[in-house]
Image: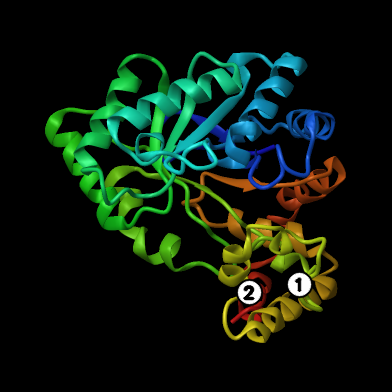
């Protein structure tokens, strides 16, 4: 495994990490979850990502139980939670968002579900137009000072919002955000590569990127259209299908077909190739992987072996295949 610093912080995360979105608490039970986390740990993964909204908190319960059952040393792994959407199925106003109350309540609830005394990483899952950014920054600083959170950050915030949070923190002598968790893959590059470009040097911001496979599109599983077994066809994820497939639908699927055809030509599986491309970006601290089977996870971890296999000209062909 390769390890990278989280931005300019001293925290070293495995270049490939493991997340529980869509899987834990839904189609993956405790037995399968145990196999997945054990496989990830055995291959050097030290960061496990979660959120209050994943399966209404059940994903965190499953992860917490499994980590405790495996008896992983607390000083050997990092675990995260994210706050905004709430864990209740029909959250009341104080059970969601980024108010001081919910940020603090959600942290305490995540600690219980994950069965840990502190969160290594704590993310604001989305920006909250109903809460002043200063209130959220102060709430996060309080949790850091109390030792309940080590590093806090954002997810899918605009560069302007991240800059404002940093400005407030520095002006008030509060703990600033350390990282951002954006979507990043061959088909979704603008925010990470352009919008955030000044923030890496300006604030030392790290990134824990999600959806390196465009929710499965870059694996080739949807080359013949969306089917019932894929993530995009799951109940309640119509918004994800619309975001990933896009409009017109055939255009994105055609780009995926070209990418998978090139992967075959290069003698590489599409998934590890797409993940390896993400790893080539020096501003990516860690690439979060999702899987429902241990074998699938292990195959995707092979992305590290592809980093030095191809020259720059070949990687340029990879990018051109989805243009």
The answer to whether any part of residue 175 appears in the image is no
In the foreground, 107 or 40: 107
Give left or right: position of 177 versus 248: left
- Residue 225, horizontal then vertical, whole percent: 77, 77
User: In the rendered picture of this protein, how many numbered marks are placed on residues?
Assistant: 2
Q: Quadrant of residue 211?
A: bottom right
Q: Quadrant of residue 294?
A: top right
- Reading the image, the residue beneath label 2 is 245
On-image quarter of the C terminus: bottom right
Mark 2 vs 1: CB contact within 8 A: yes
Q: Is residue 255 above or below residue 226?
A: below
On-image quarter of the N terminus: top right
In the foreground, 76 or 150: 150
Crowd around label 2: few <14 · some 14–19 · many ≥20 (10 Å):
many
- Residue 28, horizontal then vertical, whole percent: 78, 40
Mark closest to the chain's N terminus, 2 or 1: 1
Q: What secondary structure is found at the residue carrying circle 1?
A: loop
- Residue 112, horizontal then vertical, whole percent: 55, 18
Give left or right: position of 319 versus 68: left
Alpha carbons under labels 2 and 1: distance apart = 9 Å
- Residue 141, horizontal then vertical, whole percent: 28, 26
Crowd around label 1: few <14 · some 14–19 · many ≥20 (10 Å):
some
Residue under the point 37% across and 37% down: 178
Q: What secondary structure is found at the residue carrying circle 2?
A: helix
- Reading the image, the residue beneath label 1 is 226
In the foreground, 47 or 221: 221
The answer to whether any part of residue 130 appears in the image is yes
Residue under the point 71% across and 76% down: 256
């Amino acid at each position: 495994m390769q390890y990278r610093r989280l931005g300019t912080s001293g925290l070293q995360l495995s270049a490939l990490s493991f997340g529980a979105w869509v899987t834990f608490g839904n189609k993956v039970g405790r037995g399968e979850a145990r196999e997945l986390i054990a496989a990830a740990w055995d291959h050097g993964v030290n960061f496990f990502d979660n959120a209050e909204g994943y399966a209404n908190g059940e994903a965190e319960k499953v992860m917490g139980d499994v980590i405790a059952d495996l008896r992983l040393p607390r000083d050997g792994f990092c675990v995260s939670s994210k706050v905004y959407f709430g864990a209740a199925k029909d959250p009341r106003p104080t059970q969601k968002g980024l108010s001081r109350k919910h940020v603090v309540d959600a942290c305490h609830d995540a600690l219980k579900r994950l069965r840990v005394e502190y969160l290594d990483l704590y993310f604001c899952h989305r920006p909250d137009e109903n809460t002043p950014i200063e209130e959220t920054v102060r709430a996060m600083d309080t949790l850091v000072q109390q030792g309940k959170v080590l590093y806090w950050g954002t997810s899918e915030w605009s560069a302007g919002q991240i800059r404002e949070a940093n400005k407030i923190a520095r002006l008030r002598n509060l703990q600033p955000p350390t990282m951002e968790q954006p979507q990043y893959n061959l088909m979704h590059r603008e925010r990470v590569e352009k919008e955030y470009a000044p923030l890496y040097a300006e604030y030392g911001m790290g990134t824990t990127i999600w959806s390196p496979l465009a929710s499965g599109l870059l694996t080739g599983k949807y080359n013949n259209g969306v089917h019932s077994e894929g993530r995009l066809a799951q109940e309640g994820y119509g918004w994800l299908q619309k975001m990933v497939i896009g409009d017109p639908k055939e255009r994105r699927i055609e780009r995926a077909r070209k990418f998978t055809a090139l992967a075959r030509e290069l003698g590489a599986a599409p998934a590890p190739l797409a993940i390896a491309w993400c790893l080539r970006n020096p501003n990516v601290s860690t690439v979060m992987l999702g899987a429902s089977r241990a074998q699938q996870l292990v195959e995707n971890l092979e992305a590290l072996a592809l980093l030095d296999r191809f020259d720059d000209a070949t990687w340029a062909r990879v990018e051109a295949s989805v243009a």
